[in-house]
Amino acid sequence: MLLQERAPIFEDDTASTLGARTDNVAARLLVDAVEKIATGTAPRIPQDPAIATHWPRRRPEDGVIDWNRPSADVVRWIRALTHPYPGAFTHIGGQKLFIWEAVATTAPRGNVPGEILARDDDRLTIATCDGAVAATSFQWADQSNGMTSEGNVIARIRSAS
């Protein structure tokens, strides 16, 4: 490695916001690295394999939401896979539903993870192992415009379940 810098990850970060912040850091570090290489002052920092991260090639099934996880983990998963990435998804009535934004919420104990607990015009609440997640932006896989009308999604969910 030549240079590195830590970038904070905030609780409300998404793949897009974190990517924008780290892109800015990377651009600045690249300019600095080129200058150091040109002047012969570039450091050579060995990478510690114990803290190095490796990310395998993403497969389509990697986006599946595991409702057996705690609500906070599910929300982080959704935030990590949201735009510009392919998205986190679940299946409802045999149809693929992408969830782009969500928040953790409470729910009575004893619900089956993945069970739809509430449906209204702007959110879909789904049980997790320790509560629930309220999806606030979502779309069916066959919607081609990349945007969703939550009311239409809810109507399809009602007919699918």
Image (tube, grey):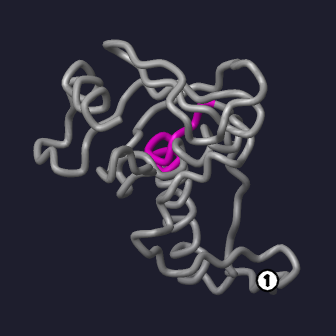
Coordinates of residue 83 in the picture (x, y in percent): 36, 46
Q: Is residue 32 above or below residue 145?
A: below
Q: Is residue 146 left or right of residue 54?
A: left
Q: Nearer the viewer, residue 59 or 125?
A: 125
Q: Does the magenta segment cover residue 18?
A: yes
Q: Characterize the magenta stretch by its predominant secondary structure.
A: helix
Residue at the location (83% across, 84% down)? 49
Residue underneath mark 1:
47
Residue at the location (74% across, 81% down)? 43
Count up the numbered dots.
1
Q: Is residue 118 left or right of residue 41?
A: left
Coordinates of residue 79 in the picture (x, y in percent): 53, 42
Residue at the location (62% across, 46% down)? 67
Q: Is residue 20 left or right of residue 114?
A: left
Q: Amino acid at mark 1?
A: Gln
* Stretch of the chain drawn in magenta: 12-21
Q: Does the magenta segment cover residue 53?
A: no
Q: Kindly state the secondary structure of the residue where label 1 is placed.
A: loop
Residue at the location (73% across, 54% down)? 6
